[in-house]
């Protein structure tokens, strides 16, 4: 049963939708523009058609209020930087000459100018471009994008709500610009930024916006009293504007905690809150402050970050409780649906019953609409939906896919000793130096080499039956031969086989482990035009047979130099998958770690002396609230050690991390007990090297000197200068020379030149050290 007011008020909405199109039309158009094959007008036309298609699809599904402004050519935080005029000085001339090219220059850089730093959007695998601000930053409003997209939606006869990154979150995500003291606090610019937001809000109101959503996910993190006071001031000022639309402040990804009472009292017209996972605590906090009398509440009860079907009955119960806490309760997903694939209907290879356990963006939209109907009209109106949902949930719970007694027994038998190397690092390091015989400042790469069109065509030919397995493998062998030959000629010290056989660093392994599901069309944006297909972790995990040994040993047979074995670590296997939600993450991590441990041990037995287990997601998976972090880091670091601790002392274990803020997990990096860690550092000017030094990190490290997420080729002098900066923090006997990340997305010409410069820089600095 529901009240009459609920029936009159309940509306369905979402905060954002996947941008790429059913066939990744946006990716193709943007990359075509970069290559000169697509005109700016054609790119804009493709974007407009994608927006139109999304809005009409949402409206046809029953969404009452569609979002605008969530669409982006590259990144919505970068769009906000353009909206508020915070263009870095080095990019101003490019933006002035051509706004679109200048926009992409900020994202990707040019040969002459470095891009903005890129890092993870909270604890997701989406990357945003970090704003660069300083005491001289002058903000200016440019509402053209937001106003234009709102008008497009209104012209279709739709009710539309513009969505903006909120001013507090924007400043809290920013960093001091190059040359600005590191202790500069961008939040001190709030009073300068708020008038710009006021101008944008007025423009949107004039264009027909009734409501505008301001996203403030940064407020779900632990915040100081000063930061909370700044947020209170921001919404007091914006809420007090005379010429404004109704303001909806949204948060997601976790509980708001102490920020919720402040927002509840702010002079805004509504809140959009997450009520899934840890954020379910928002319900109790909201009740404790007396709810939102006279205000609108959008209840995010459908998980927007995972792919499992919603428990409709449980969500309806939550919605029923919320009815008495606000003037009007509307229904939504917990966050933008940007973080999930588009539609399960495209998946033909997943067994139909298992497919019914899954909900992508279109299915989550339908769940939102169903819950809205149930809230407004009562459970009888959705009785058939509830019955089907109960059957799907029961099917998953009782399926043999989800439970393997042998896997569970092995995981239960793990002891603390299993997750410890047999000797301490100092003894291992001496054994490894004697065994490997590497020079000072050894050079290596992170793992992958360019995935050429020919390689992708070979995989497509294999799938389509145009070539057989033998023909495909011959192409892979030829590619590995070329990669090994290039590295030897260039002078790289520790080689890699280049991973030509791998489609993705997680998917490749998931397809060979039991318990995982792979999708054909489950694309999700990671950054810019980089889309991935996260596998789905549906059941207990085991490794039926070796996954990497064959190609690694083949590469080693081609050279006398050490070739690294390359694996993706257990935390990243979870973080970059859609993980099961029916058991603790730590339990799942232990299962994955044991499967990977078997692979590590077989690589060593086959003669591999250097093994890299990548964990780029260790930082991104860190819980947003400090109270939750110790427990996470305990199981996360144990899972890595469990993966790597079965090898001999003279086998060197590497790990790799990239594009995250590492300063607050340096102790966890230490606790991994890896012999060598490589880290992203080029865009942040070796910040991580200084953080490792401040911690007293005792092992070897390779802070990157080549930013691989930009097409620009760093000069030898530039790489050498970064190395010298690294040497001021890390002693030469423990410093490695490497790129920031894998080279899969780069083209061969820039890769060759960049790695040649990297090796030349290492030789230059070695000579300097020998003379000093």
Image: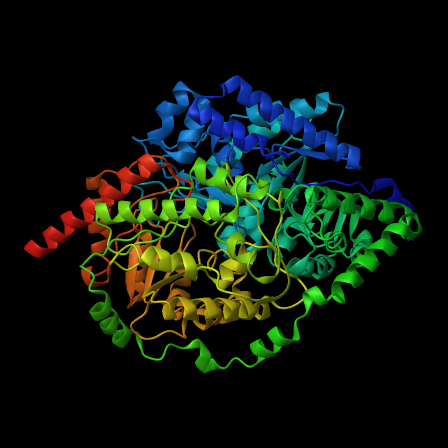
Would residue 739 be seen by someone viewing this image from the given angle? Answer: no
Of 705 and 484, nearer the camera is 484
State the image quarter where residue 57 is shown. Answer: top right
Q: Is residue 659 left or right of residue 263?
A: left
Which of the pair 69/470 is nearer the observer? 470
Quadrant for residue 752, please give it. Answer: top left
x, y percent for residue 268: 67, 41
At 87% from the left and 45% from the top, the residue drawn is 376
Q: Residue furthest right?
A: 380
Q: In this rendering, is residue 578 above or below 747?
A: below
Tell me: residue 152, above or below residue 168. Answer: above
How is the rendered protein coloured? rainbow
| Observer-nearest of 6 and 123 | 123
577 left or right of 181 in image:
right
Left or right of 393: which side holds 427?
left
Horizontal and vertical percent position of residue 222:
53, 58
* Residue 204 % position (x, y): 63, 26
- The residue depicted at 60 percent of the width and 73 percent of the height is 407
Q: Quadrant of residue 211?
A: top right
Relative vertical location of residue 474 with respect to residue 428 in this rendering, above or below:
above
């Amino acid at each position: 049963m529901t009240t009459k007011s609920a029936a009159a008020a309940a509306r369905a909405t979402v905060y954002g939708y996947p941008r790429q199109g059913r066939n990744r039309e946006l990716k193709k158009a943007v990359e075509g523009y970069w290559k000169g094959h697509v005109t700016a007008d054609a790119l804009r036309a493709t974007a407009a058609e994608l927006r139109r298609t999304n809005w009409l699809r949402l409206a046809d599904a029953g969404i009452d209020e569609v979002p605008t402004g969530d669409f982006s050519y590259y990144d919505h935080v970068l769009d906000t930087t353009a909206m508020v005029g915070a263009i870095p000085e080095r990019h101003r001339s490019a933006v002035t000459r051509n706004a679109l090219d200048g926009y992409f220059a900020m994202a990707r850089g040019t040969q002459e100018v470095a891009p903005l730093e890129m890092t993870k959007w909270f604890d997701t695998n989406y990357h945003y471009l970090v704003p660069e601000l300083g005491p001289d930053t002058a903000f200016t409003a440019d509402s053209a994008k937001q106003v234009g997209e709102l008008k497009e939606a209104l012209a279709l006869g739709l009710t539309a709500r513009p969505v903006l990154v909120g001013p507090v979150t924007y400043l809290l995500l920013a960093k001091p610009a190059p040359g600005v003291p590191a202790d500069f606090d961008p939040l001190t610019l709030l009073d300068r930024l708020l008038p710009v937001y006021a101008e944008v809000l007025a423009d949107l109101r004039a264009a027909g916006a009734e409501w505008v959503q301001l996203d403030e996910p940064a407020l779900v993190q632990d915040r100081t009293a000063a930061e909370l006071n700044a947020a209170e001031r921001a919404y007091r000022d914006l809420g007090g504007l005379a010429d404004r639309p109704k303001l909806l402040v949204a948060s997601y990804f976790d509980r708001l905690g102490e920020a919720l009472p402040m927002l509840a009292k702010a002079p805004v017209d509504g809140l959009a809150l997450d009520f899934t996972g840890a954020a379910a605590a928002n319900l109790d906090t909201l009740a404790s402050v007396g709810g939102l009398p006279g205000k609108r509440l959008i209840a995010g009860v459908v998980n927007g970050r995972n792919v499992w079907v919603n428990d409709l009955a449980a969500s309806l119960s939550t919605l029923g409780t919320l009815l008495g806490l606000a003037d009007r309760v509307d229904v939504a997903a917990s966050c933008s649906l940007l973080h999930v694939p588009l539609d399960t209907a495209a998946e033909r290879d997943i067994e139909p019953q298992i497919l019914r356990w899954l909900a992508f963006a279109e299915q989550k939209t339908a769940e939102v609409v169903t819950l809205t109907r149930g809230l407004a009209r009562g459970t009888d109106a959705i009785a058939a939906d509830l019955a089907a949902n109960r059957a799907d949930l029961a099917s998953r719970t009782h399926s043999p896919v989800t439970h393997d007694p042998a896997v569970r027994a092995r995981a239960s038998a793990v002891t603390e000793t299993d997750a410890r190397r047999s000797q301490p690092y100092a003894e291992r390091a001496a054994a490894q130096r004697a065994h490997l015989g590497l020079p000072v400042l050894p050079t290596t790469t992170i793992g992958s080499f360019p995935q050429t069109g020919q390689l992708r065509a070979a995989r497509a030919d294999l799938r389509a039956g145009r070539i057989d397995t033998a023909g495909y493998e011959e192409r892979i062998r030829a590619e590995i031969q070329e990669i090994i030959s290039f590295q030897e000629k260039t002078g790289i010290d520790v080689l890699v086989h280049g991973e030509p056989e791998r489609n993705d660093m997680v998917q490749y392994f998931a397809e060979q482990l039991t318990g995982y599901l792979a999708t054909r069309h489950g694309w999700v944006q990671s950054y810019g035009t980089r889309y991935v297909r996260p596998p789905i972790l549906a059941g207990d995990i085991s490794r039926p047979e070796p996954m990497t040994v064959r190609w690694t040993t083949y590469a080693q047979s081609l050279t006398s130099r050490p070739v690294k074995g390359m694996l993706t670590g257990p935390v990243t296997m979870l973080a970059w998958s859609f993980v099961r939600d029916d058991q603790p993450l730590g339990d799942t991590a232990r299962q994955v770690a044991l499967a990977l441990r078997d692979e590590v041990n077989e690589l060593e037995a086959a003669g591999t002396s250097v093994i890299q287990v990548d964990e780029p997601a260790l930082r991104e998976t860190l819980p947003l609230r400090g109270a939750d972090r110790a427990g996470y880091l305990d199981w996360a670091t144990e899972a890595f050690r469990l993966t790597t601790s079965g090898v001999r002392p003279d086998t060197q274990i590497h790990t790799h991390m990239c594009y995250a803020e590492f300063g607050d997990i340096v102790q966890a990096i230490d606790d991994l007990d890896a012999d060598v860690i490589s880290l992203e550092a080029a865009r942040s000017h070796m910040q991580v090297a200084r953080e490792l030094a401040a911690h007293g990190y005792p092992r070897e490290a390779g802070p990157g000197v080549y930013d691989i997420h930009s097409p620009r080729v760093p000069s030898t002098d530039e790489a050498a200068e970064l190395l010298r900066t690294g040497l001021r923090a890390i002693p030469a006997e423990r410093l490695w020379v490497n790129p920031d990340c894998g080279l899969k997305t780069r083209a061969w010409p820039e890769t060759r030149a960049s790695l040649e410069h990297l090796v030349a820089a290492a030789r230059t600095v070695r000579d300097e050290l020998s003379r000093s």
